[in-house]
Structures are given as structure tokens and as C-alpha cells.
Image (cartoon, grey):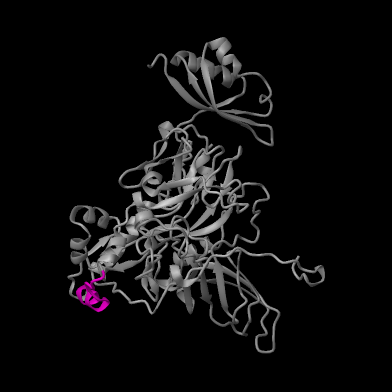
Amino acid sequence: MGTKLRTYEEINEKIKKGQVVVVTAEEVVDLVREKGVERVAREVDVVTTGTFGIMCSSGAFLNIGHTKPRMKIHEAYLNGVMAYAGLAAVDLYIGATQPAKDDPLNKVHPGEFRYGGGHVIQDLVAGKDVLLEAYAYGTDCYPRKKLVTWINIRDLNEAYLFNPRNAYQNYNVAVNLSDKTIYTYLGVLLPRMGNAGYSSAGQLSPLLNDPYYRVIGIGTKIFLGGGIGYVAWQGTQHNPAVERTERGIPKGGAGTIAVIGDLKGMSPHWLWGVSIRGYGCSLALGLGIPIPILDEETLYYCSVSDEEILAPVVDYSHAYPYGTGEILGYVSYAELRSGKITIGGKEVPTSPMSSYSKAREVALTLKKWIQEGKFTLTQPVAQLPGVESGVRFKNLVERPVEASVIVGR
Amino acid sequence: MSNNGSKKVVLRFPREVADRPIVCELALRFGLRFNILRASISPHREGIMVMELIGGRDRQEEGLAFLRERGVFVEPLSQDIRMVEERCYHCGTCVGLCPTGALSMERPSFLVRYDPAKCIACELCILACPTHAMEALL
């Protein structure tokens, strides 16, 4: 299994010559069933993966350029949505889940959350003018105190996505055991297990095709929002040491990646502002990673199918919000994608939050880019923390605080 | 079937008539069977009811004419819920919620398809759609 088949340099040489063989992580499943791992590993140079879904831990850094007189922005709003300004004078960070300042939130439950940070990012990428309102306290070197203007992505010095956590390696399946409808980030969940929400591209999902992070690492070039991006770091809550199946697939949320990419090269076709009823706003985006078939083992992991990927079913009316850790059972992505799962003898319709057709389109687009010589592969400069790294997801341990030191509300 | 078909209608009850027992007359006077698919009263005390009327076409028309005389606004249900294709990225969260299969996942394309004929305007899809791709014209 360990024999080296090809190097990054050899793959990139084939890409330049237009001789590279690329298949998607979906296509490779049948190919391996037909021909076996050994033969396909010799024939295929690259397997492309893809996912498209709501990824809340996303946002964009913007540098708007200096004003005359200069201003060190203290508080900023983009189309009425607060952007973080606690950076240098005219640097801002717009987070995907920030609701508009005048949003009624959940005051009338379930709130609509019609416009937020994700929508601002979508509007910027679509080339629409965005209203900037900024305030400052004024300093000797930055005297200006107020700024109201239209901005456009083409005029910004920099605009890049920097998403602290994307592409979750597997995730929960959410059901509702209570007697009333609940509104979660995995969708509207009907009472008494009326439906089940889930969100993963399964066999197409990047980190499920490289379960031990053997080839995806820091510096890996990726498809991000229809443009080019890179893996910047392990994502927040990266948790490699979870229970895995025999073929190494985590049986629940595990690895994650932080990604970065030039917003100016992206497309609104791949970045969508979303409103999740009763929960908040966010950003849905397309992300894909090419996997170089360096050896048979890499290909073996890429050939994983939806039948072999299991996700834990969790009650989002109690077990999830109160963190009990209780799991009602496991279901495969093949069952989830069939439209119905069976839990405790009950047939439950499934409600996916991620788009399988768009995930497939990401993988196919990346495949095309590589075949056409528009996208070459990069070797990671450092590995993501693996199973043996000791990196573990921890819950917060709260400690008592004296009332006199509390600074918030 | 033409003589014994069913018809889905949206009934709007202005405040003046919302508290009167009108709907039961459909059964008592016209021998129509009906299935209430949805009913609500707004904060302004106007009522809205989505109903399937079962019975002969003539009796259906007579019954609906009676409702109109009593001040109820009657509209056909069809096309009251629509899908705005360009706003849909085909996640399918609506599919698992749709009680009648009006929204379904086409395979192997995994594209969401909408059949208005099967829709009973429960509006669960409108509640759940993250991109506002489902719209009510009610």
C-alpha cells in the first residue's frame, strides 16, 4: 500500500501538458468497485472533492482605503450590519452571522433574520454598492469622526475571505423529540421526530476523503467560493481524536480547516447569504479540495462511499442544547440521501441543509480547472494536527467571578 | 371524476363575518364534504382558511357562490405558493418538511422540484427556506 506512485511535481507536469487524469470523489467510488484500488490508483492522478453548505464560521477582511482627513474607524456598519473595527484604521472584518443592527432577532419567535453579514459578503462579491457608515472618536493623527459613503469591492484595497472553521469532517443528524417545532441551524425540526436535519456532502466532502489528513494540510490550494483559496490552519474546534470506523471515518464532527481566499476572484454563484429561521443569518459557500493520488492508500481513502460514512443522530430539543452527549443511533449518508432514515423503528423524512448537487458541481468544476491546466496542486507546508497530536475539543469550564470586576452588561 | 371531484380554495373572512358559522353551511345546505387544510385568524381578526371541497362541480359552485354572498372572498389555491428558481440552491431542507410531496428531490440530479398541484399551502417550506426561494402570494 505504501509504494509511492507519483509526486506533486509529476502531477503538475502532467497538468501543464494536459495529460492529467482527474475524477471526482463521487466518480471514483464506482471506478474502484469496478477495477479495484490498485488499478485505479495507477490510472488516476487527482481526485476532486466538493461541498456546498452553510458555514457559519466565515467572514471577510476588507481594507477600504484612507479618507481625507484620515480616520481610525471605531465602529462600522455595512448595509446596516456591524463590521468589526478593532483593527488598524481602515481594516474591517465582516462576520457571516452578524445580523443587521435593527433586526428584531428572536423577539417575535421564530425570527426571520432577513439580512446579515453573509448577505453583505454576497452583495460585495456580486459587485453591488454597499453602504458604509463609520464612526470614530478622533485622534491627533486620525481626526475624522464620521463617514457615510458607498463602497464597491472593485475599489477596496483588499477583500479576502478568512473563515476560521469550514468543511467540517462529518456532522450530527438533528431530530426533535419534543412536542413542539424547534428552529435550529440544521433547519426547522418538526415535533416527535417529524423530520431529520443534516449537513454534509458525505462521500464528496473534502476531509472525509482524507480522513487522517495525510494530504490536506496548511498551504493546500483549494476551490473557495468559485475562486482560489488556501488552507490557512486547522479550523477552530478541530477534533481529530474522535471515534472512527474501521476505515478511519470519524463517527461525528471531527477535523475542520481554516481557509483564506481572494474575495475579488469569487462569484455570487458560490457565496449565498442565508436566513435560518429562528436561528440567525449566515453564509452558504462552495469549497473543494483536490487530492493528489500519491499512493494507493490515498486512493483507498478517496474511494469511501456514502454507505460507509456514519453520522450520529442527536435530539436538538434537549441533548444538543444541554450538552448531554446522548446519541440516539447512527445512520449512513446513503440512508440520509435516500430521503428517509429509520430511528427506533420510526421512518423519518430527511431535510438536508447542504446542497449535494452544488457539492457535485464544485468537484466537477475543480476537475475541469485541473484538466484545462488552470489549477495546479500545492504541497502542504505543514500538516494538520492528527489523531496522535493530542489536540482535543474542550468544553468551557466556567469559574466564579466577583461582581466588582464584571465589565460587560 | 368531474362530477365528484375536489377543488382547493382559499377563503378570506373579513372581520365582520369571521365570527359567524358560515362554513358548516357548505355541508348542511349543499351536501359538500370539506377538508380544512389550514386556518388562521390575524391580529386584526380577519380569518383565512385553505380548504379542499369535495363533491359535485355544480354543488361546489353553488356553495362558493353562497360564501361570496355572505361576504367571504374566495380564490382558487393554485399558484398561491411559488418557487423562485434562481434563489434555490437545492439543499432540500424543504423536502423533508413538505407533507404532500409537492416538493421532492429528483434523483440522481439531487435538484429540488416543485409540483404546485400537490401543494396545500401549509407554508412550512417558506418558514424553512434559507434563501427565501419559496414565496406565498396569499
Q: Position of residue A381 (x, y in %)?
A: 38, 79
Q: Looking at the image, is A37 positioned above or below residue A390?
A: above
Which quadrant of the figure contains the N terminus of chain A? bottom left
Q: Nearer the viewer, residue A233 or B5?
A: A233
Residue located 66% across and 53% down the image: A104
Q: Is residue A161 visible?
A: no
Q: Nearer the viewer, residue B16 or A105?
A: A105
Residue located 38% across and 68% down the image: A213
Q: Looking at the image, is B135 positioned above or below residue A44?
A: above
Q: Position of residue A247 (x, y in %)?
A: 35, 58
Q: Quadrant of residue A295?
A: bottom left
B109 on left or right of B81: left
Q: Is residue A5 magenta?
A: yes
Q: Which residues are magenta?
A: A2-15
Q: Looking at the image, is B23 positioned above or below residue A249?
A: above
Q: Is residue B100 visible?
A: yes
